[in-house]
Image (tube, helix red, strand yellow):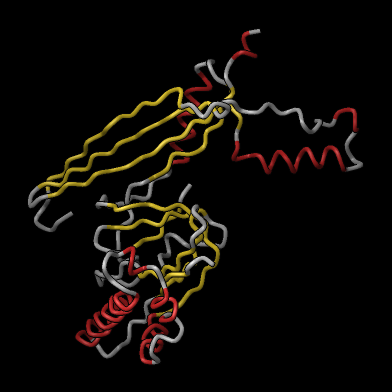
């Protein structure tokens, strides 16, 4: 079955290395959603591990739950790949203009071999004319 | 034993006291960013710093003088940080005296942060009502090029 050959990925996080406060978790969510929708990858979600552990512990240890329906421990699939990245910025400003270059880098690492199997980056430039009162 | 150092954060521009004295959404040059977790949070007032200064830095001075901050800020020593701290307080008091006799009791927050490398840093910065820190929070320690440090929450 093709579903079983799709690589299992976990998203580490996008490290925000700019001076600005940016919700990189939201960016990460968008990326993993797109990848999941593409049908080429399977994902495990590290941000919900504790919630899952709590639920499975409840199912297995609480007398309320029928043991035959309880989700068993030790059946989850380990991720083979880690997706991670950086968001950085370079700021250049002079008397009348301020330029900000944002660089977004992403990598996919095969955790068994440690090899980076894929990497890509993109740059965005934002320019702002300075007003009399600064910016 | 990990060196405990105290870093003073930006308090440079004196503006309205209800907002933090810096903009988190402004793109400025960055030297480096360290990621870590908040180990403890303590609210202090500028008054306490002023008192401690007149006591010869008994509370905050030890950490300052014994810290590694001097190396990080290049060529300085712990004393440099004490001087920065002193000048910030001095500047603020002078500013207030110009306007009124009222003492502006700015709320500051002292954060003990353990970064990913295991080192611990003590940071004193403005108490920003829009961004409160709690024990266990993921944070970023942003080293700006004007030799100040800012703590920002991370994801």
Rendered position, A29 above or below A62 = above
For residue A122, what is the image quadrant?
top left
Residue positioned 21% across, 39% down in the render: A126
| Screen quadrant of the N terminus of chain B | bottom right
Q: Is residue A43 above or below residue B120?
A: above
Position in image of residue B134 (x %, y %): 54, 62
* Residue drawn at 61 percent across, 28 percent down: A79
Give the total of numbered labels: 0
Instruction: Report whether B122 appears left or right of B74.
Output: right
Q: List x then y, in percent, for residue B106.
A: 37, 77
Q: Position of residue A62 (x, y in %)?
A: 88, 43
Q: Is residue B40 above or below residue A53?
A: below
Percent from the top left, x then y, of residue B114? 51, 60
Judge whether residue B155 can be spotted in this image. yes
- What residue is shown at x 29% (from left), y 52% (from top)? B30
Direction from residue A130 to residue B148 in the image, left or right: right
Front-most of residues A119 and A125: A119
Q: Residue furthest top?
A: A1
| Above or below, B134 relative to A67 | below
* Residue under the point 12% across and 58% down: A133
Q: Is residue B125 visible?
A: no
Depth check, front residue: A7 or B117 = B117
């Amino acid at each position: 079955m093709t579903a079983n050959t799709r690589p299992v990925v976990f998203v580490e996080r996008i490290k925000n290395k700019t001076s600005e406060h940016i919700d990189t978790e939201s960016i990460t969510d968008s990326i993993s959603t797109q990848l999941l929708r593409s049908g080429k990858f399977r994902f495990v979600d590290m941000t919900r591990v504790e919630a899952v552990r709590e639920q499975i512990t409840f199912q297995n240890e609480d007398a309320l739950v029928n043991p035959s329906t309880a989700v068993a421990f030790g059946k989850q699939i380990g991720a083979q790949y880690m997706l991670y990245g950086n968001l950085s910025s370079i700021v250049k400003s002079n008397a009348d203009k301020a330029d900000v270059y944002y660089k977004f880098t992403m990598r996919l690492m095969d955790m068994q071999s440690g090899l980076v199997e894929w990497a890509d980056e993109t740059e965005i430039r934002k320019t702002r004319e300075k007003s009399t009162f600064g910016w | 034993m990990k060196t405990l150092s105290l870093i003073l954060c930006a308090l440079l521009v004196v503006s309205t006291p209800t907002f933090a004295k810096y903009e988190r959404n402004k793109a400025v040059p960055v030297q480096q960013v360290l990621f870590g977790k908040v180990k403890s949070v303590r609210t202090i007032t500028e008054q306490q710093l002023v008192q401690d200064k007149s006591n010869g830095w008994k509370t905050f001075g030890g950490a300052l003088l014994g810290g590694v901050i001097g190396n990080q800020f290049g060529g300085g020593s712990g004393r440099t940080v004490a001087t920065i701290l002193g000048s910030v307080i001095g500047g603020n008091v002078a500013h207030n005296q110009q306007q009124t006799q009222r003492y502006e009791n700015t709320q500051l927050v002292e954060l003990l942060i353990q970064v990913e490398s295991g080192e611990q840093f003590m940071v004193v910065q403005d108490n920003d009502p829009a961004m409160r820190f709690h024990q266990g929070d993921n944070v970023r320690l942003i080293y700006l090029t004007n030799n100040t440090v800012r703590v920002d929450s991370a994801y």
